[in-house]
Amino acid sequence: MRLKTLALALSTAGLLAAIPAAPASADGPWPDEEPWPPGNCQQGTFCAWPNWAPVNSGPTETPSLVTTGPWTGSAPTKTFYNYTTANVELEYHHAWQDDSTVITHCATPRGNIFYLQVIVTKVNWHGSC
């Protein structure tokens, strides 16, 4: 019971926390001082990685997901980066759960970081979030 309570507390307290979005700029890359930069994610794409990214440098490993439009599949994810100027709606479930418990998350521009391993199953580009 305590493990379920701890898992729920972790999920509620920070699983979906993302760095607050700053106004999008059409002029190019985000500021250098961003604590979780896009790493090897190209501007105009949504990227996800199955591992943690180093702070201040961003991920350099091969992403588990890169998309510029709607996507469905199965991508293990601990770190993501929305390198677009639009909201992207994600559907996922926790890695330790079956896929019947679907959670939706709005990834705002520059939004990133899941704290625990999740499986992203759907990306609604320019979602309604």
Image (cartoon, rainbow, N blue to C red):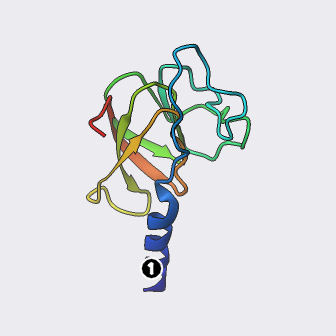
**Mark 1 crowdedness (10 Å alpha carbons): few <14, some 14-19, many ≥20:** few
Q: Position of residue 54 (x, y in %)?
A: 71, 43
Query: Is residue 52 rendered to the left or right of residue 26?
Result: right
Q: Which of 18 and 23 is in front in this view?
A: 23
The residue sitting at 60% across, 46% down in the picture is 51
Q: In this view, does 101 lie above or below 19?
A: below
With 58 as the anchor, is 10 left or right in this view? left
Q: Horizontal and vertical percent for residue 9?
A: 47, 72
Q: Looking at the image, how many numbered discs can be counted on the residues?
A: 1
Q: Which residue lies furthest to the bottom in this view?
A: 1
- The answer to whether residue 71 of the structure is visible from this angle is no
Q: Residue at x 60, y 31 (%)?
A: 62
Q: Name the residue type under label 1.
A: Thr
26 left or right of 60 in image: left
Position of the C terminus, as image quadrant, is: top left
Residue 61 is situated, as x and y percent measured from the top left of the image, at: 65, 34
Q: Which image quarter is the N terminus in?
A: bottom left
Please tell me in which quadrant of the rendered image residue 123 appears.
top left
As displayed, is residue 65 above or below residue 13? above
The local secondary structure at tag 1 comes to helix
Residue 68 in sight in this render:
yes
Residue extending farthest to the top is: 27
Image x and y of residue 104, in percent: 32, 49
Q: Which of 39 and 34 is in front in this view?
A: 34
* Residue designated by label 1: 5
Q: Which residue is depicted at the point 53% across and 57% down?
A: 116
| Left or right, residue 12 beside residue 125 | right
